[in-house]
Image (tube, rainbow, N blue to C red):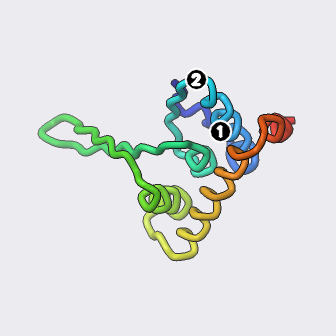
Amino acid sequence: MFDEVDAGIGGRVAEIVGSLLAELSRHHQVLCVTHLPQVAACARHQLRVTKQARGGGTIATVETLDADGRVEEIARMLGGARITETTRRHAGEMLGQAAAPARHSKSRVAGRAR
């Protein structure tokens, strides 16, 4: 379980962390809480956790995202409150690129970490 293991990083380093977590998940169950689209895009499955204040407490909801939901969530992570077709395209591209290394050998992921 990794709770915001990616705090304080971004960009290329976040991509590397996401790739390494994906590699780790080939042999172990990995749960990772992240706010970075670069890390989330590397996941095989993605959940969205939302919280709402209700009756003096907080209600958390967990939702499993399908392919379209993942694009929307990654786009939200990239673009904030206003999701555009450009952020959706970028999200789809990130998801596609993140999926590509999973089809290749372990050495490609290890090579990225150098």
93 sits left or right of 105 in the view: left
Q: Which amino acid does label 2 sit on?
A: His
Kindly identify the residue that appears in the image at 64 percent across and 58 percent down: 96
The residue indicated by pointer 2 is 28
Helix, strand or loop at mark 1: loop
Which residue is label 1 attached to? 8
Judging depth in this view, the residue of 14 and 18 nearest the camera is 18
> Could you classify mark 2 by the number of other residues whose Cα lies within 10 Å: few (under 14), some (14-19), or many (20 or more)?
few
> Does dot 2 land on a helix, a strand or a loop?
loop
Which residue is at 64% across, 33% downward? 21
Distance, label 2 to label 1, CA atoms, is 25 Å
The answer to whether 17 is drawn above or below residue 38 in the figure is above
**Residue 95 position by quadrant:** bottom right
Which residue is at a point 40% across and 51% down the rendered structure image?
A: 65
* Residue toward you, 104 or 67: 104
Residue 48 placement (x, y as % from top left): 39, 46
Q: In this view, does 95 lie to the left or right of 58?
A: right
Vertical placement of residue 100 versus 20, above or below: below
Q: In this view, does 96 lie above or below 82?
A: above
